[in-house]
Image (cartoon, rainbow, N blue to C red):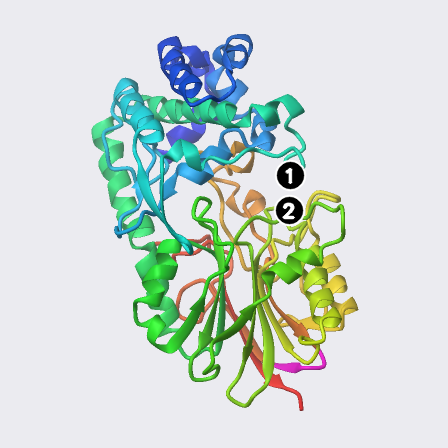
Amino acid sequence: IMTNIEKFIETPGANDVPVKEVFTEAMFQSLETRMNAIGWPNVRSYWENDFQNRPIISGFMKDEELGSKRLASMPDRITNTINVAGSDEPVCRPTVINMYGGDLSTTPTWWKAWEKFMFDDALSISTKNGMMIKKPFEMLQGIKKAKYPAISEQEETDSLPLQTMCGAIFDAILVHMMNTVSSPNVWQPLKKTMVESLNKKKVPHTLEILKDVYGNSDIITLQEVSASLIDQAKHGALGKTFWIAAPDDMDPVRDQNSVVLLSKAMFPEGVVSEITDRVVASFPAGVAVPVAKGDINAITTVDKEGTPYVIVSFHGDTNGLATIPVNDAIMKTIQTNSDLMNHKLIFGLDANTYENAKPGKQQNVLEWGSSYVAHGQSSCWGDIPQPGNYTTFNARTYLQPQLNKACKSTEKREKGDVNPKDFIVFRKQDFDVVSTWKDNTGDRMYIEDMAFPTLNFPSDHGILATVLERKF
């Protein structure tokens, strides 16, 4: 089936029909009525003058500019899978590319469910300030030109209804494509089997690895963590042995948060304070650093011997361009606040650095190494990180909203995300590295040239572990 999908997109031929033959005028009118009713700008001009006539593959799915503008991928990120309060099961947008278990055998059946989900279903979302009731359309976020420069100023103004329309077109094309390359009674049961292994069991499997394999750690930093995982960790076995600290600015909509776990045995007082706001305040004035709510979690704590620490967990943006500015801000925060100057720093991060970075567009890993060394820091990989020391190996299929990142079945290694992205950083004056290892099996082993996640390993980043010896 995946080979047939690849062929459908790479050589569509007669299948490259206009969007309006898949997402119909009647569907657009229904969507337009919904969006007008909530007071969004009208996007009929975009539909009539552009989108309805685009070929579904060459003009929409494979349009690189549309990908750069995030008009299909942004609504997918927000609404694909939504963790709701009081339920172990998330709510999923009716689409091919998530855990949605409803019927997708015809486009009209899909559209009825999609419209109801987006505009009618009120969901309970847990936040640090309590529970919020929101419908999925209310969770969407505007697309800012400052972060995604490909988008025009007018498109930025219209980005909420525009991304909703593009998201609907995207999902309609996926349903149409699946029912063209395969029969619903074949692909839907297969999807259900994969969902059970890769999605529904992801949080329990992640927690199991952390508890059984890395439960003896003193510090664990996690990135892109859902509110559901945080809640289950706090109320499960990990919560008995670790303080579990989520950021104060946790984002319940994007639901990707950096988390710090502190061993209760090593840090009996737990979190003393969160200083994320001080780190953010240390960014250079007038410079737009591409970080979102929940990306940075900086805390202070004191170990059982009375030694104070700053512990930071950070998730870098896709291109890694925030990584150096965030580290600069952390160091500035420590060095310019008298109450932090004597603290020892442990900084665990998904740096999103690249072996062969696109100049000016992605963060080169060697440049990142030079930057932290200039601060008197080192890392678990030493002063000079090895560009070929990979901690990711994943290749996107054609069933996703950013086809510029899709890999042919024969090009997983060459065009996949195979990069040295993960680091544990500290000041040289504080620690020596005793040992470091990476793990993409959940068994303290790393298999090179193996794509992951797998049915046995739930993450698209390897686990990175290091033993540090304190200098006295």
- Please name the residue shown 26% across and 39% down the image: 190
Tag 1 secondary structure: loop
- Place of residue 276 in the rendered image (x, y in percent of width and height, measured from the top left): 59, 61
Residue, x 35% and y 21% (percent of image)?
176
Instruction: Work out whether mark 1 precedes mark 2 in sequence or the reverse, and give the earlier one.
Output: 1
Q: Are marks 1 and 2 in contact (CB under 8 Å)?
A: yes
Q: Quadrant of the C terminus?
A: bottom right
* Horizontal side, residue 304 vs residue 230: left or right: right
Mark drawn on residue 174: none
Decide: is 275 above or below 138: below
The quarter of the image holding the N terminus is: top left
Q: Residue at x 30, y 67 (%)?
A: 235
Which stretch appears magenta? 428-433
Label 1 CA crowd tier, 10 Å (few <14, some 14–19, many 20+) = few
Residue type marked 1:
Lys
Please tell me which residue lies in front, 364 or 233: 233
- Looking at numbered disc 2 in the image, what kind of residue is underneath it? Pro
Vertical relation: 132 (above or below) 168: below
In the foreground, 298 or 467: 298
Are there few (<14), some (14-19), or many (20+) residues within 10 Å of tag 2?
some
**Magenta stretch contains residue 429:** yes
**Residue 221 point in image, percent of width and height:** 50, 66
x and y, in percent, of residue 158 in the image = 56, 23
**Secondary element at image label 2:** loop
Residue holding disc 1: 147
The residue that disc 2 covers is: 290
User: Residue 422: horizontal and vertical position, in percent?
Assistant: 58, 61
